[in-house]
Image (cartoon, rainbow, N blue to C red):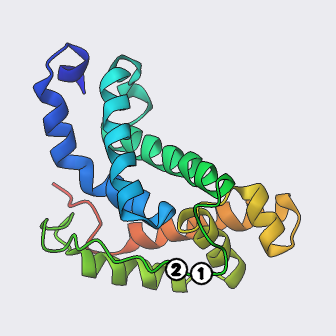
Amino acid sequence: MLELQQGQQDALAVLFDRHYRLVMTVALRILRDYGEAEDLMQDVFLEIYKKADQFDPAKGSPKTWILQYAYHRSLNRQKYLNLRSFYDSREEYPVEPWDLKHRSNGWNGLSYDDWARVIQKGLETLNEKERMALDLAYFQGLLLKEIAEEMNEPLPNVRNHYYRGMKKLRTFLQDQSCLKKKAN
């Protein structure tokens, strides 16, 4: 990001190569349409290029910043498409899993299949309401207010389920031996 902020245009290619799979996966999960997800991925990286000077390393990593752009842009695009009846609510759109396991070595020594199993075990440690709040937020792209309506619960309760679920999942993932930082 520093190189991109300094005007080195080749730095965008490096960022794209490192993070396009992540952006595409988020967009595809939320938009449920491959073409729309590809368009959104390109828009996200174009905006990252234009707004590179707004990146503040004190607030987080470039990966986190890009992920936030992807997530919020996907949600905005989903709302836009819903308003224009892009999605037929009676029809289910199957999402082909974007096969990342053959395109990368995974992260932290685990394959994407291993990560899926670890995260699934982590989700199993949550109660039903916490799991549902996280599912609706991250995989359905709903806002907490919309989740409250969907779950027929007051917003403060949903907020509690969401944040407790996130804390439990984070703690579970940090406690996994494969994720612990090695002591020097």
Helix, strand, or loop for circle 2? helix
Residue 148 screen position, x and y as percent = 80, 65
Q: Quick one: 151 or 33, which is closer to the camera?
A: 33
Identify the residue at horizontal 14%, vertical 18% (top origin). Answer: 8
Q: List the residue tagged with mark 1.
A: 91
Does residue 121 sit above or below 142 in this rendering? below
Q: Quick one: 121 or 85, which is closer to the camera?
A: 85
Answer with left or right where residue 169 lies relative to residue 161.
left
Answer with left or right where residue 62 lies relative to residue 31.
left
Does residue 166 sit above or below 36 in this rendering? below
Q: Does residue 16 show up?
A: yes
Instruction: Name the kind of residue labelled 1 in the image.
Output: Glu
Name the mark on residue 176: none
Q: Quick one: 18 or 47, which is closer to the camera?
A: 47
Identify the residue at horizontal 41%, vertical 58% (top origin). Answer: 26
Helix, strand, or loop for circle 1? loop
Residue 156 screen position, x and y as percent = 84, 58
Identify the residue at horizontal 67%, vertical 64% (top origin). Answer: 162
Does residue 42 sit above or below 127 in this rendering? above
- Name the quadrant of the N terminus: top left
Instruction: Name the kind of residue labelled 2 in the image.
Output: Leu
Q: Quick one: 22 or 106, which is closer to the camera?
A: 22
Mark 2 crowdedness (10 Å alpha carbons): few <14, some 14-19, many ≥20: many
Looking at the image, is mark 2 or mark 1 nearer the viewer?
1
Identify the residue at horizontal 32%, vertical 31% (top origin). Answer: 46
Q: Does residue 61 show up?
A: no
Q: List the residue tagged with mark 2.
A: 123
Mark 1 crowdedness (10 Å alpha carbons): few <14, some 14-19, many ≥20: few
